[in-house]
Amino acid sequence: MKIAVLGTGVTKFGEIWEKSLADLAKEAARQALDDANIEISDIDAIFIANMLAGEIENQVHLGSLIGEELGFNGPAIRIEGACASGGMAVRNAVLSLLSGEYRRILVIGVEKMTDYQSDQIGEALMAAADEEERVAGLTFPSLFALMAKVYMDKYKIKRSDLAQVSVKNHFHASLNPKAQFPFQITIEQVLQSPMVADPLHLFDCSPISDGASALVLANMNYVSQVYPCPATIIASAQSSDTLSLTKRKDLTRLISVEKAAKKAYQTASIGPKDIDFVEVHDCFTIAEIMALEALGFYQQGEGWQGAVKKETYLEGKLPVNLSGGLKAFGHPVGATGVKQVVEIADQLRDRAGKRQTSKARIGLAENIGGAGGSAVIHILTN
Amino acid sequence: MKIAVLGTGVTKFGEIWEKSLADLAKEAARQALDDANIEISDIDAIFIANMLAGEIENQVHLGSLIGEELGFNGPAIRIEGACASGGMAVRNAVLSLLSGEYRRILVIGVEKMTDYQSDQIGEALMAAADEEERVAGLTFPSLFALMAKVYMDKYKIKRSDLAQVSVKNHFHASLNPKAQFPFQITIEQVLQSPMVADPLHLFDCSPISDGASALVLANMNYVSQVYPCPATIIASAQSSDTLSLTKRKDLTRLISVEKAAKKAYQTASIGPKDIDFVEVHDCFTIAEIMALEALGFYQQGEGWQGAVKKETYLEGKLPVNLSGGLKAFGHPVGATGVKQVVEIADQLRDRAGKRQTSKARIGLAENIGGAGGSAVIHILTN
């Protein structure tokens, strides 16, 4: 598998009240097209990742809407898989390019969330979860809090071990001007922030955000010889687990991520040791820890050591979430999975500014939907 | 292009209050798997078409939800493009199969609409339209009524010429026990039914429906020699037009359909004359007339002659909407585009019962989103 990343784009993430969903999508798309040095007329299809526009803005059919905004009249579709919508859109663009039907695809991830009350958004987000758990009053923080509780009991870790993940991701975000929270925080600030769902404090949780991200992907047969093109997708894998936590045997493992990782490593003919840096889906601090284990970087029960021992910092042996992650870069749901691939590609092309890692040879992006009901993984190299 | 249809499934369409969205999806999926004589474990991915579950049931992430219900833990995604969601799911399954990444894909189209007030549904459906037109008070019946008005003025046709389309589709539905309205109606009944949006009466409009449809599609490399497999997809094409009617130059043409048709005919190396029967997107009677012109079966301004001259009836020269169409079979939005391909495949495999056409050699399915903002076309043969 080999698909070229010709261009990347990402807006500032945060509370962007002056821009609409279409404005954000266009801004990211224009950046990616300019970066690829092509026009919209060179694009054969648009894949849009979005979770909530139907529920909170009463707007679906985003393919046609955003296509019209961009002056595009070819095939345009929306792909949705909760918080994994972005990863799924990238993956399905990759597969469609491999079919030979399209030469170049514009992938856009976009979400507009901060114009609404947070309880509205909280309820809308639970649309990604199991109905029984929703009706029982669970929310995403409480689902991940359950996972964190079991994990902490089983592996005897402290709340501050969770908090270290957030401190690290804020440190990386402090080097990224597009981040929603481009500043550092301390362990004490995390532990003293309001409790959301025991053991998760407010600063263990990723925020509600507006933002968009975009990629121009191309079949290698249509990449001209002179194009520098230093980033390519060499593996794409997706897997599922039960939507409901109640049907899972072990709350401390992300089985969907384990399965997708196995496939991705097989496709790329590499293993976890070959990966130089990663973007993982840290919707909550516990999620980053479990992801690092599911991806094979740490043994079961040891993923928390990454941030504590500073191994997952910019200068560590395996930099994790150099963008700032969902926690500190922000988490406009549909944009997240696309943004992760943007960050990997930008690092591989030596364009990551102050947060550039010297290790950028092979990077991996892990994106999950719900509480791990879906997982998508991409591996890129330069 | 050649993709095998290994199995088909479709539930009864209508007001199915005793079954949930997941129940309907499972029922259609089981039919398709049984028809293909394979197990869910033989499936590599699930593609789900659905428009409204997020808005009216607060449930997204249907890939994970329905995957869990079916005991499936591979990649599962939802594809949405308003009323063209079904066609888009089929198309993207086709492309993913052509990539070689998957051997067999289960495509499910499903929508659950009748548990809600019709004004709720009417508002939710407008999520597929342009925001300005929505805010101006337009609804889908009134958007298509505008198109019908212009068409009637330009080509001097009568209201009864529109009504004939509905009469024909009800006649076909009377031969289809799974149809929502399996009975005949008269021209007088259409013309005397309540006015919805001048010139469209209630019986010019497709209904609100519950229902699901499913297909098992396979890469030809994974179809065993002994499998009978008499239906194959030989062309798949998608195109777009502006979402808003106000930006179009000619309200009497479906430009997205014209463009998609051109591509589909090119792919299959055939022309309109080679098509034996079709399923078109008759969300309103005018839409069938415009579709027949856009597909090249009739000249501009003459598509209405199909039903009036009985050319598009079961025994006519080009049977159209043998299933009963959206008007009389029903229109559970996400299910529709998948159901059209099910009908074409069932006709090609001589399984259409009383509505079986003797002409079933090459069939075409045309599915649109919004007021033609998106269009998807598939051509199948046996």
Image (cartoon, coloured by chain):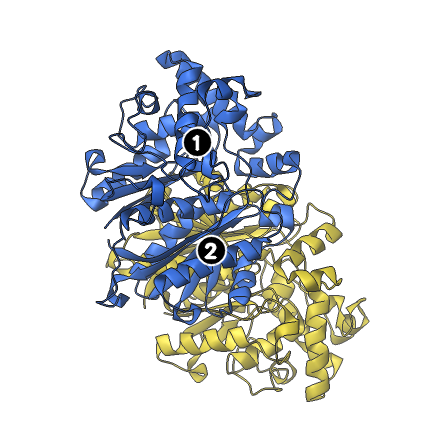
Chain colours: A yellow, B blue
Residue found at the far front of this picture: B354
Q: Nearer the viewer, residue B7 or A193?
A: B7
Q: Is residue A144 visible?
A: yes
Is residue A91 found left or right of A367 in the rendered image? left
The image position of residue A237, as x and y in percent, is: 43, 69
N-term mark: 2 or 1 = 2
The image position of residue B238, as x and y in percent, is: 35, 43
Please determine whether, in this image, residue B76 is positioned above or below residue B351: below
Please determine whether, in this image, residue B357 is positioned above or below residue B148: below
Q: Secondary structure at mark 1?
A: helix
The image position of residue A62, as x and y in percent, is: 50, 43
Q: Is residue A39 visible?
A: no
Q: Amino acid at mark 2?
A: Ala
Q: Residues within 10 Å of mark 1 (few under 14, many from 20)?
A: many
Real-space Cα distance between discs 2 and 1? 23 Å
Mark 2, residue position: B28
Please determine whether, in this image, residue A256 is positioned above or below residue A310: above
Residue drawn at 60 percent across, 39 percent down:
B124
Same subunit: marks 2 and 1: yes
Mark 1, residue position: B170
Q: Secondary structure at mark 2?
A: helix
The image position of residue B167, as x and y in percent, is: 42, 26
Residue drawn at 31 percent across, 27 percent down:
B293
- Where residue A372 sits, quadrant-wise, is bottom right
Q: Nearer the viewer, residue B145 or A360?
A: B145
- Where residue B354 sits, quadrant-wise, is top left
Give the chain of mark 2: B
Q: Amino acid at mark 1?
A: His
Give the chain of mark 1: B
Is residue A137 found left or right of B312 in the rendered image? right
Q: Nearer the viewer, residue A134 or B18?
A: B18
